């Protein structure tokens, strides 16, 4: 649904009812303390230390802040970080590649200055080569771009790598997984969309699991991430297919106990 629509359990790359800044509070005033997670202080070490240590079977939960209350973003980030989140997922939309607009580098910079959590920036933008550097400089640790853009994807990934961050490539539900082949040697992770980006409240698309399996079966050595409609019912399906990073928006932020919701997602997986 478009902005203002009712949110459902799951979600990730959509724009929910509470997912926008409200009057009277400036997003630059985000203040989060007592964080559990760390990010690299030396960008030269980012390729090996920007994510929490994990084993081949570890599952990481990445709450999407689009489902948070932007009028109280500091508190919402605090609750999920304290609740065991492994990363924070930041969905950036430009109004061109997808029909909604979210936020840009200034908000990422504000969050970066307030938390040590790993920031996973998913760029749903038409011209990533113009902006990936700014998102890296703002403090993003992981930065992913869509394979479907008409821009120079290879150059965008190179810029991310040169900035000392983790580059990733994103695949929409209706895009053939073979489109990723030229870029797999260049990335540390692949994000498979299990809904169409830009709209909230969509149901999980089971057919995308074949794409995750295909990447796993090809021996892709990086992380497989999945975003859209992830909840206690769909998380086990995604993990069985090979996903190890689960983006969850409403399933975490709409829960009365967010720490318990993160534990349930990890346990269900």
Image (cartoon, helix red, strand yellow):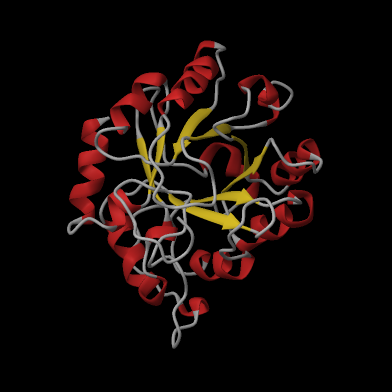
Percent from the top left, x then y, of residue 26? 49, 82
Residue 30 relative to residue 138: left or right: left
Q: Nearer the viewer, residue 213 or 35?
A: 213
Closer to the camera, 29 or 269? 269
Labels in figure, total: 0
Occupied quadrant, residue 34: bottom left
Q: Residue at x 76, y 51 (%)?
A: 127
Relative to 196, 83 lies left or right:
left
Image vertical order of residue 261 relative to residue 137, above or below = above
Relative image position of residue 33 (x, y in whole percent): 35, 69
Near-viewer residue (65 or 100):
100
Q: In which quarter of the image is the C terminus?
A: top left
Is residue 174 visible in the rendered structure shown here?
yes
Q: Is residue 113 left or right of residue 36?
A: right
Picture coordinates of residue 94, whole percent (x, y): 65, 59
Q: Is residue 88 left or right of residue 157?
A: left
Q: Is residue 149 above or below residue 214?
A: below
* Res 34 visible: no
Q: In which quarter of the image is residue 45?
A: top right
Q: Quadrant of the N terminus?
A: bottom left
Is 137 located above or below residue 243 in the figure? Answer: below
Residue at 33 percent of width and 53 percent of height: 250
Point 31% across, 33% down: residue: 235
* Front residue of 153 and 20: 20
Q: How far across and how far down the image is residue 166, in percent?
A: 61, 41
């Amino acid at each position: 649904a478009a902005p203002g629509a009712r949110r459902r359990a799951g979600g990730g790359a959509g724009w929910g009812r509470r997912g926008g800044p409200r009057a009277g509070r400036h997003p630059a005033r985000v203040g989060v303390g007592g964080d559990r997670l760390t990010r690299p202080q030396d960008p030269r070490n980012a390729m090996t230390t920007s994510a929490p240590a994990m084993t081949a079977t570890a599952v990481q939960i990445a709450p999407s802040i689009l489902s948070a209350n932007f009028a109280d973003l500091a508190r919402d980030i605090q609750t999920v970080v304290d609740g065991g989140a492994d990363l924070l997922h930041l969905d950036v939309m430009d109004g061109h590649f997808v029909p909604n607009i979210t936020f840009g580098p200034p908000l990422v910079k504000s969050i970066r200055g307030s938390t040590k959590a790993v920031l996973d920036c998913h760029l749903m933008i038409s011209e990533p080569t113009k902006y990936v550097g700014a998102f890296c400089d703002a403090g993003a640790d992981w930065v992913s771009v869509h394979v479907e853009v008409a821009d120079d994807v290879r150059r965008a990934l190179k810029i991310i790598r040169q900035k000392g961050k983790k580059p990733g490539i994103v695949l929409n539900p209706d895009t053939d997984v073979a489109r990723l082949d030229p870029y797999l040697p260049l990335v540390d992770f692949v994000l498979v969309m299990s809904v169409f980006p830009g709209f909230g409240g969509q149901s999980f698309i089971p057919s995308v699991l074949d794409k995750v399996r295909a990447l796993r079966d090809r021996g892709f050595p990086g992380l497989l991430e999945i975003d859209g409609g992830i909840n206690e019912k769909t998380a086990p399906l995604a993990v069985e297919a090979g996903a190890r990073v689960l983006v969850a928006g409403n399933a975490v932020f709409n829960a009365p106990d967010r720490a318990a919701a993160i534990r349930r997602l990890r346990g269900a997986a």
